[in-house]
Image: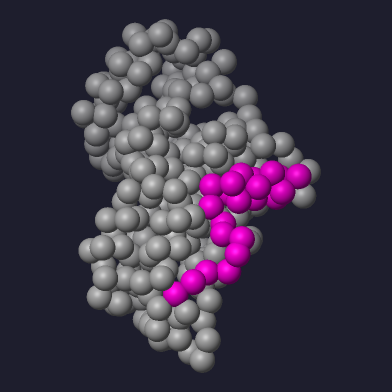
């Protein structure tokens, strides 16, 4: 069996649309996970016009996810941080303070789109932060970083249901430690910005955590927990996330770069992070906040 999930912004999902799709695809009864926001129905096969319908619904502000019914409620969350659990790219915000914001943002965009080698692009950008006072990290965290809507409910609900939550980032531990603590993640992994005498050295510790290290985190943590990779829900938005998104049981491209989303079967462009609960079959009244 397969489950189709429809997700839109609150109040934007019309019951008639859900019923029409159910009828067209010969699905079972529509179950509402949140009134006018999220609904699902089961069916025996994946429709041949799945992606044509997906594209049509995108134009209506509705996300469509089709996945096997069995095992869709996951035992582990593996999440990227920048532009996923938070709304910014931390290195871009540090660069703004350093006065090289536009230059660094351009490099970041190309790296996240897969146009540049991640490691080389990170080294180039971090070099531009040389001599910034370490205190700028705390200033950026308090004044420039905002959380992606739904992240707190996602982590709290999955943990309350026995799942393990890990934050893995190609960014920096100085940020992941704070974000992980705020949202309640069980652990976090990222790169370490090097500093001396209270100032950034313009470099990061080796080895650099990038695409391969995120896959390694998926393998290591799932093995440690005694679960399989199919028990993992991974979420990210950039090219360096594709490895873990491809190996996880459910790989979610969240508001992702087009070149990234095109390689993922689960694409969330209109919902927030609570969409990751809906696709697991959680109803809004089951969310932990």
Report whether residue 256 is seen: yes
- In the rendered image, the quadrant that contains the N terminus is top right
Residue 52 placement: quadrant: top left
Taking the magenta stretch, the answer to whether it contains residue 96 is no
- Name which quarter of the figure residue 129 lies in: bottom left
Horizontal side of 79 relative to 56 (left or right) equals: right
Q: Residue at x 54, y 34 (%)?
A: 246
Residue at image coords 39%, 42%:
114
Q: Is residue 156 left or right of residue 275?
A: right
| Image vertical order of residue 240 relative to residue 37, above or below | below
Which percent across, then down, holds residue 33? 43, 35
Magenta range is: 202-223
Residue 224 in the image: x percent, y percent?
77, 49
User: Relative to residue 135, is residue 62 drawn left or right?
Assistant: left
Q: Residue at x 33, y 48 (%)?
A: 110
Whether 39 is drawn above or below 142: the answer is above
Where is residue 69 shown, x and y percent of the image? Answer: 57, 23
* Front in this rendered view, residue 231 or 220: 220
Residue 267, position as x, y percentages in the image: 39, 34
Left or right relative to 213: residue 16: left
């Amino acid at each position: 069996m397969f489950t189709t999930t429809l997700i839109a912004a609150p109040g934007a999902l019309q019951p008639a649309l859900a019923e029409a799709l159910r009828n067209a695809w010969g699905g079972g009864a529509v179950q509402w996970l949140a009134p006018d926001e999220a609904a699902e129905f089961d069916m025996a096969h994946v429709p041949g016009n799945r992606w044509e319908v997906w594209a049509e619904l995108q134009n209506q502000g509705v996300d469509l996810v089709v996945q096997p019914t069995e095992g869709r409620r996951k035992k582990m969350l593996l999440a990227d941080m920048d532009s996923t659990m938070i709304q910014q790219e931390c290195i871009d915000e540090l660069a703004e303070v350093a006065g090289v914001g536009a230059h660094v943002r351009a490099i970041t965009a190309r790296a996240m789109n897969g146009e540049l080698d991640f490691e080389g692009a990170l080294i180039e950008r971090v070099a531009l932060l040389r001599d910034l006072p370490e205190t700028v990290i705390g200033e950026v965290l308090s004044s420039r970083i905002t959380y992606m809507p739904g992240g707190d409910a996602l982590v709290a609900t999955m943990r309350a249901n026995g799942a393990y939550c890990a934050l893995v980032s190609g960014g920096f531990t100085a940020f992941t430690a704070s974000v992980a603590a705020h949202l309640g993640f069980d652990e976090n992994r990222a790169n370490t910005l090097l500093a001396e005498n209270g100032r950034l050295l313009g470099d990061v510790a080796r080895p650099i955590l990038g695409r391969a290290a995120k896959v390694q985190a998926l393998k290591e943590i799932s093995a440690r927990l005694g679960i399989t990779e199919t028990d993992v829900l991974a979420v990210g938005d950039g090219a360096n996330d594709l490895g873990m998104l491809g190996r996880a049981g459910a790989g979610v491209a969240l508001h992702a770069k087009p070149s990234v989303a095109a390689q993922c079967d689960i694409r969330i462009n209109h919902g927030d992070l609570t969409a990751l609960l809906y696709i697991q079959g959680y109803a809004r009244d089951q969310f932990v906040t």
